[in-house]
Amino acid sequence: MNTDDLTRDLARAFPADTDHLNRLHDRLVDAAQAEGILDVVYRDVDSPVGPLLLAATDLGLLRVAYASEDHDAVLRALAERIGSRILHAPARLDTVARQIEEYFDGRRRSFDVPLDWRLSQGFRQTVLRHLPEIGYGHTASYATVARLAGSPKAVRAVGTACATNPLPVVVPCHRVVRSDGGMGGYLGGVDAKRTLLTLESAA
Amino acid sequence: MTGKQPFEAVVTTHGATVLRVCRAVLGGNDADDAWSETFLSAMKAYPDLPSDANVEAWLVTIAHRKAIDVTRATARRAIPVAQTPDTAATSTVDGHGLDGDLADMLTALPPKQKQAVAYHYLADLPYTDVAAILGGSIDASRRAAADGIATLRRAYPRVPTRKGEPR
């Protein structure tokens, strides 16, 4: 018996199967939660605009990310900015995941979950906080949103705020369009924006 | 990328190895407790871990200490319990029992030998790291692992080796 055989046999003699590791992982989430050492929890949710990453802190939903943003990169950025004690904990995000599913089924018009706004600062956050005033199924121009946010001339800044929205879908930056009727850009891609607007206009 | 990986990546990358090591050193339910204690404690300390640290060696070091704690706690409440059937591995003709036998044999080794074998062969740590965990010299760790392996080889000849080969 050579060393490689022995290593392989030892690994087989002390198995670590996926189900068992998943149970230990769940225990770790519970223990970390009880000790208050979790910075961020996250999960995926499927949607017609691709898998969405949902990340939350104790304060509320922190981040929604499209696949095009690279979920791993988003989580690394959260580790840098918020804290590295991040765990995959789907059950902790059941409420928001269910609301997102209801939204895409056309059964929900607004979201009712606490939000953690800390990834957006200053005027950008002011802009984003006004976006829910654009009702479901409606759109508003960048200029209108600038007026809503109290700075009628800050049209470009509104564009930037929407383009860097950390909470797309839930904070409806997709309802902000160009004054000439054009759709304007979208951080999840123009196709995703069209899908959301079509969904809302159909309901 | 200078920053630190989310802790989830640490769990998914090293969770299996740490569980194998805990099972080798402790066996049974105690291994689960040691695994849980290890990752909870690692998670607390994670923000202060230097980003160039060897994460696996760090985790095995914590697991080593937690295993000692768990062993002591178990010894303190030592109430004899009936042997449960699934812990008593039985040899079978098709070879299924061999893994269980090997596990039993490793667990029966003296602690230093068992730990040296687990940390070097299961966790793949170099002897410098094994020695740092166990204390003592690198040579002493290497010897402990070699002695342990020699015992395993004597007690656990792989069967069958090759057709017609003398056993």
Image (spheres, rainbow, N blue to C red):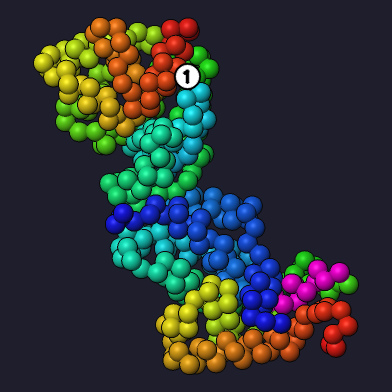
How many numbered callouts? 1
Query: How far across and how far down the image is residue A192, in percent?
Result: 42, 22
Q: Is residue B152 above or below residue A103?
A: below
The quadrant of the rendering that contains the N terminus of chain A is bottom right
Q: Secondary structure at mark 1?
A: helix
Q: Determine if the magenta segment contains residue A80.
A: no
At a point 32% along the width and 13% down the height, the residue shown is: A183
Q: How many residues crowd around disc 1 within 10 Å: few (fewer than 14), some, or many (20 or more)?
A: many
The image quadrant that residue B48 belongs to is: bottom left
Q: Residue at x 49, y 32 (%)?
A: A51
Say which of B135 and A145 sits in front.
Answer: A145
Q: Which residues are magenta?
A: B94-104
Tell me which residue sits at (68%, 68%) in the image.
A12
Main SS, magenta residues: helix
Q: Which residue is mark 1?
A: A103
Q: Does B100 appear in magenta?
A: yes
Residue B20 percent location from the top left of the image: 60, 68
Residue A70 percent coordinates (x, y): 40, 40
**Left or right for B105, reference A39:** right
Residue at x 26% of width, y 36% of height: A118
Q: Is residue B133 visible?
A: no
Where is residue A29? Give x, y as percent. Answer: 48, 50
Q: Nearer the viewer, residue A93 or A159?
A: A159
Q: Quadrant of residue A146?
A: top left
Subunit ID for the residue under disc 1: A
Residue A187 visible in this rendered orientation of the protein: yes
* Residue type of the residue flagged with mark 1: Tyr
Above or below residue A135? Residue B44 is below
Quadrant for residue B122, please give it.
bottom right
Classify residue A33 as left or right of residue B18: left
